[in-house]
């Protein structure tokens, strides 16, 4: 009796002596000698009539006993199930994959392959991820599929179990709004605990931990504890470099940092040749050990030496990010490390990087707040030379590149213009709301106007379901439109409606401040928004917020002419508790002006700043600031002549001929209001005005008021 077995994704057993007992016929004459020899069964049982099933690998490419035609009859694939796995992997959309699952007869391994490939599609294709998250029908199909998979989990082998965990972790990390993903992962954990780990090989231990590590926020304490016991019992000598790195990284990522395990790992790593570790393994170890509470000095020293000896241009962008974030544990200055990265990349030329890698590299450098102007300039030139590549960029990469330059405050007009043109050429409804927000915010951050882009963004957002957009992204959108003066009335009304529908207790201070600032900046009326926001501001502990944030709110209410005495009094009480060193000259001027415009009597506030004004060197203030302070004190506390005289004396030293006539008249009015109509400064200003009348021979005097000039001063304050 000859028994043949074929190795691949799925391993059907063919017994020639009993081939009519339910097995598909095999044309043995079509087999080559090599295939016959490679198919002999090497693990017969003692009676020679049965043999163990070989544990197949996931995922892997397969060979065929015969080449089947790709057709289905009555839902069953004609050919072996191995070929079906190949068809599964070639499917490119979640919908097509789930349709394939529903119309084909699958065994357990095929089903796990569907699950794994579904997760990979969602992980690698942002549009498919968006569809699963937002399409109820598609999400419902995916949820039903997962429920069926969970029923068969007790029947899958160890590799299938680890692949299921990996797939579920991918879906969980991508936030696809499928419920119970954590519960499903926990179910897989319980199955693994039930089986135990004494029979599990080192590779499957590493892969199971890797899947849990990718899930991150899943509670794996019990499972990690059992695996740790088994690992310490076995020792680490039989773990390959790859398995060792994956295991250590997974424990660190899950927060299960057991010092006895990490000390054992350190000892094992140091016993090996560190140069034999691959780039990604090195990065995994670096990331893991940088998270430990106890510093492994000897190992970190070896890491530092190895890092300096490696060509950093060979590292992938995300690996460079890990190095940058973990370098503090290696006592390496981040700027020095970045300089080394820059030199390596520039030496190798950025053309070796794909557009996706460039986007990630820029993102990681900008997120660390490091100096990388030369790198950004080089990458900009590289992107602009790849005009065809710009057309092939994914939407997420365009958003990432724009965001990175904006965060670095690099105003690259050519690059932004090229990317804007590409954005406008594409189907506007294929952009995710979050990507549209980043487009707008990035252009606003570097102050590059793009009216047609903002019009498109506003039009699309008006037509989309805004309930899933986080509050901070709504704030970013409004800020961007306000910053560049792009008044899209329909969008503002849509966002206003969405903001008011939500609980105001869920908004933070800065989001609320941005809401009212944007509406005030563009003169968009929303009394209800300002009323509700004021009530919420009153609840906040203002001590937790800086002066600039307070001024942002005060300016917004003043600009919108939305007078809320309770709100202004609450802010005044907080201002009086602060140290005067917290306030800049401009901030003092702004606060006094807002309260004077609001006509809210706050003598304590004016005296609080008045003492500071007397102590200050008023020569540091420009003339417009002095005229504003003068009017504020003359209007609010005219009895404090000492403050007014101090300001008047400083203004007498100034050349006032370059100020608008209306501003000069405003100063005269202020001094008259304070009971000083015959002061020396009034005489000087009247003389100046008389001279202008003579020169202009009764013509129009230059327009402009003190309020208008101060408006200009406020326009560019809030850029954060």
Image (tube, rainbow, N blue to C red):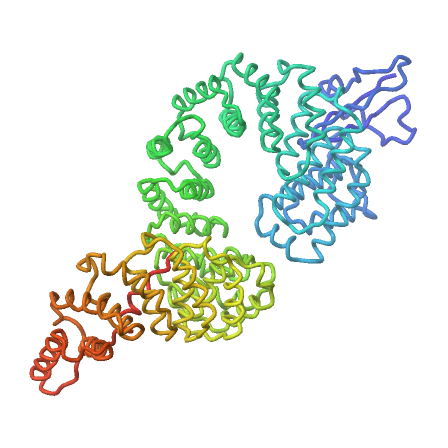
Residue at x 43% of width, y 50% of height: 403
Task: Answer left or right for 400 relative to 226.
Answer: left
Residue at x 30% of width, y 56% of height: 584
Image quadrant assignment for residue 249: top right
Q: Residue furthest bottom?
A: 698
Q: Is residue 391 above or below residue 282?
A: below
Q: Nearer the viewer, residue 24 or 336?
A: 336
Q: Quadrant of the C terminus?
A: bottom left
Q: Is residue 625 above or below residue 88?
A: below
Residue 82, percent across and down? 74, 34
Image quadrant assignment for residue 345: top left
Image quadrant assignment for residue 453: bottom left
Q: Quadrant of the N terminus?
A: top right
Q: Is residue 703 visible?
A: no
Q: Is residue 342 above or below residue 311?
A: below
Residue at x 37% of width, y 40% of height: 370
Q: Is residue 245 visible?
A: yes
Task: Answer left or right for 319 relative to 205.
Answer: left
Residue 611, percent across and down? 27, 60
Residue at x 55% of width, y 66% of height: 499
Residue 330, percent across and down? 43, 26
């Amino acid at each position: 009796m000859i028994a043949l077995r074929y190795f691949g994704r799925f391993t059907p057993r063919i017994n020639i002596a009993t081939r009519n007992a339910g097995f598909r016929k095999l044309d043995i004459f079509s087999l080559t000698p090599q295939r016959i020899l490679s198919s002999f069964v090497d693990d017969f049982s003692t009676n020679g009539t049965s043999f163990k099933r070989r544990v197949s690998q996931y995922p892997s490419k397969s060979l065929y006993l015969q080449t089947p035609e790709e057709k289905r009859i009555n839902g069953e694939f004609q050919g072996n199930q191995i070929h079906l796995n190949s068809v599964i992997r070639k499917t490119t959309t979640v919908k097509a994959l789930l349709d394939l699952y529903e119309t084909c007869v699958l065994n357990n391994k095929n089903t796990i392959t569907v699950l794994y490939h579904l997760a990979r599609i969602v992980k690698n294709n942002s549009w498919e991820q968006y569809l699963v998250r937002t399409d109820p029908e598609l999400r419902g199909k995916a949820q039903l599929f997962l429920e069926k998979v969970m029923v068969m989990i007790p029947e899958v082998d160890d590799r299938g179990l680890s692949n299921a965990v990996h797939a579920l972790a991918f879906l969980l990390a991508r936030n696809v709004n499928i419920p119970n993903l954590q519960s499903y992962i926990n179910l897989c954990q319980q199955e693994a605990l039930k089986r135990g780990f004494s029979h599990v090989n080192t590779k499957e231990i590493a892969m199971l931990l890797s899947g849990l590590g990718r899930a991150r926020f899943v509670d794996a304490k019990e499972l990690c504890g059992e695996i740790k016991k088994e690992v310490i019992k076995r020792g680490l000598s039989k773990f390959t470099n790859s398995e060792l790195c994956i295991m250590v990284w997974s424990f660190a990522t899950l927060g299960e940092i057991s010092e006895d395990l990490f000390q054992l790992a350190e000892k094992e790593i140091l016993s090996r040749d560190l140069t034999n570790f691959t780039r990604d393994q090195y990065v995994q170890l670096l990331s893991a050990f940088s998270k430990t509470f106890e510093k492994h000095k000897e190992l970190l020293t070896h890491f530092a030496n190895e890092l300096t000896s490696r060509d950093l241009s060979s590292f992938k962008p995300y690996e460079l990010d890990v190095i940058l974030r973990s370098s503090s544990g290696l006592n390496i200055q981040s700027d020095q490390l970045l300089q080394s990265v820059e030199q390596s990349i520039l030496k190798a030329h950025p053309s070796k990087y794909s557009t996706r890698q460039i986007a990630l590299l820029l993102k990681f450098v900008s997120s660390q707040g490091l100096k990388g102007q030369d790198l950004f300039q080089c990458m900009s030139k590289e992107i602009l030379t790849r005009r065809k590549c710009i057309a092939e960029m994914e939407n997420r990469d365009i958003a990432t590149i724009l965001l990175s330059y904006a965060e670095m405050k690099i105003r690259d007009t050519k690059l932004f213009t090229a990317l804007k043109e590409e954005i406008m050429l594409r189907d506007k409804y294929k952009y995710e709301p979050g990507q549209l927000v980043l487009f707008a915010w990035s252009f606003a951050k570097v102050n590059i106007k793009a009216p047609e882009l903002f019009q498109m963004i506003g039009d699309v957002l008006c037509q989309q379901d805004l309930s899933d957009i986080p509050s901070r992204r709504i704030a970013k959108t409004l800020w961007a439109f306000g910053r560049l003066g792009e008044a899209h009335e329909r969008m503002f009304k849509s966002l206003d409606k969405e903001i008011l529908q939500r609980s105001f207790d869920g908004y933070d201070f800065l989001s609320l401040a941005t809401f009212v600032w944007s509406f005030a900046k563009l003169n968009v009326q929303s009394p209800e928004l300002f009323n509700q926001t004021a009530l919420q501001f009153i609840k906040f502990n203002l001590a937790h917020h800086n002066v600039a944030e307070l001024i942002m709110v005060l300016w917004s209410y003043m600009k919108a002419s939305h007078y809320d005495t309770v709100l202004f009094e609450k802010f005044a009480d907080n201002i009086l508790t602060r140290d005067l060193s917290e306030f800049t000259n401009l901030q003092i001027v702004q606060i006094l002006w807002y309260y004077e415009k609001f006509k809210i009597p706050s003598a304590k506030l004016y005296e609080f700043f008045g003492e500071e004004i007397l102590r200050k060197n008023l020569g540091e203030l420009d003339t417009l600031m002095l005229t504003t302070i003068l009017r504020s004190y003359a209007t609010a506390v005219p009895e404090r002549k000492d403050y007014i005289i101090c300001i008047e004396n400083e203004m007498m030293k100034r050349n006032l001929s370059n100020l608008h006539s209306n501003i000069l008249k405003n100063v005269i009015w202020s001094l008259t209001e304070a009971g000083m109509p015959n002061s020396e400064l009034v005489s000087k200003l009247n003389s100046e005005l008389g001279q202008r009348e003579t020169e202009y021979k009764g013509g129009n005097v230059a327009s402009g008021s003190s309020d208008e000039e101060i408006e200009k001063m406020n326009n560019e304050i809030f850029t954060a």
